[in-house]
Amino acid sequence: MKILHTADWHIGKVLHKHSLKEELEAFFDFLIETIKSESINVLLVSGDIFDLANPSSKDREIYYNLLSKLSQLGIRTIITGGNHDSINLLNAPKEILNHLLITVVGGAKENPEEELIEIKNDKGETELIIAAVPFLRDKDLRTINSDKKYKDRTEAVREGIKSHYMRLAAICNEKYKDIPAIAMGHLYAKGALTSDSEREIQVGNAAAVESSIFSDTFNYVALGHIHRPQVIGKKEYIRYSGSPIALSFSEKEDNKSFVIVEVKSKGELLPTVITIPKQRELKKIKGSLEEVKSKLEKYKPAYRLPSFVELEVYELDYSSLMISMLEDVIALHNEGNSFKILKHKTFFEHGQNDTSTLFTHGEQIEDVSPIEVFKKRLESEEIDSDTSQKLQEAFLEILETIQTEEV
Ligand SMILES: [Mn+2]
């Protein structure tokens, strides 16, 4: 039996107002081709299907068209909700999708046992168990450990996630002793290398879970949330598949991929990483204005879709003339078709005045996450680190409520 693990599709994601739809659709074609050529039996998608809790009807159409193609292949698909997804939105078509062999677990179940999905072979025997754990929200974790007292919210979150997985492992050991098991998850595991496009789940690294929470009952752990493909805790069988396409400039060097695991018997399942063909280059060009100008003139994109370019200009003295010259250069190049300059930043060694500002010239609000803005604001207050931590946790809690508001 062959499993394909992917995550973090972020359908509807725009990068500086530019849609990433074309590379995402190319990925979907590649996914379908691979499922056919590798004879995949089960597809696992570990959260963040959509970028927004309330995706546009066009983005929903992309999703349903893909599901329709998947169902024609006759494979089992298991989709879990991520921190970007609306539970209700994912769950709404769940009954009809069941008929197409597509199982959706939008949010945590009151009884975690219901997150266990049996995969049967042609003879009707259970050959594999999937613990389809979606992103666990604060409210899910509170009900799990409501009788215990914790030092702070971070600890409660960590312990809640741990006991959720422990409980599922215990059920697997009891009910499905000799059957291979795979756990899914949408969380921040300790040691994971992040990029600029994950929305913070909990404050910093403090609430990151240890890879040891995944009992060795699970022969493979299919994770989502972190957009760089990677192994966790040096364990080959605990992995982030990563997002299929670069979602921020910080991911420009990533080799985007997904993972195939073959299940033979109980024991560690070793993965094969499949690289996803790149459709578009994200390129950073930096130097003085003159250097940037000449680099832009020489630059030739190497992929099918127009490149997205980010400029960083370094000059000695502040000059408004220079800024307007740079803007002219950008406008000129953006008339062409081979690349688009999406963002630019200018750094002056000697500023316009001595007062420090929050951002350098050209920095846009979408480059800065809400928690970063909030942290900068906290820096201007005289408060101790404990209070600061508590305020940040409270801020993230409010943020999560807003971002995942049900539609
Ligand atoms: Mn994500």
Image: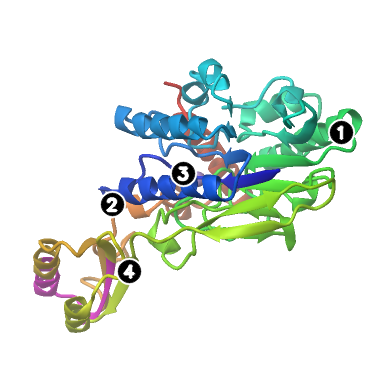
Q: Secondary structure at mark 4?
A: strand
Q: Earlier in the sequence, mark 1 or mark 3?
A: 3
Instruction: Name the disc covering residue 283, or none.
Output: 4
Q: Which residue is mark 3?
A: 9
Q: Which amino acid is tagged 3?
A: Trp
Q: Earlier in the sequence, mark 2 or mark 4?
A: 2
Q: Quadrant of residue 397?
A: top right
User: Any atom of ligand 1 within 8 Å of the CB at mark 3?
Assistant: no
Between residue 353 and residue 241, name the one nearer to us.
Answer: 241
| 340 with respect to 369 (left or right) | left
Where does the N terminus fall, quadrant-wise?
top right
Could you tell me residue 387's position as x and y percent? 60, 45
- Between disc 2 and disc 1, the foreground one is 1
Q: Earlier in the sequence, mark 2 or mark 1?
A: 2
Could you tell me residue 155's position as x and y percent? 73, 42
Q: Which residue is mark 1?
A: 170
Residue at the image point whose x is 55% and y is 52% from the top: 226
Instruction: Assess disc 4: are there few (<14), some (14-19) or many (≥20) residues with their C-alpha within 10 Å of its C-alpha.
Output: some
Q: Which amino acid is tagged 4?
A: Lys
Instruction: Assess disc 1: are there few (<14), some (14-19) or many (≥20) residues with their C-alpha within 10 Å of its C-alpha.
Output: some
Colour scheme in use: rainbow
Could you tell me residue 251's position as x and y percent? 44, 62
Q: Earlier in the sequence, mark 1 or mark 4?
A: 1
Q: CA distance from mark 1 to mark 3?
A: 31 Å
- Region in magenta: 310-327
Q: Earlier in the sequence, mark 3 or mark 2?
A: 3
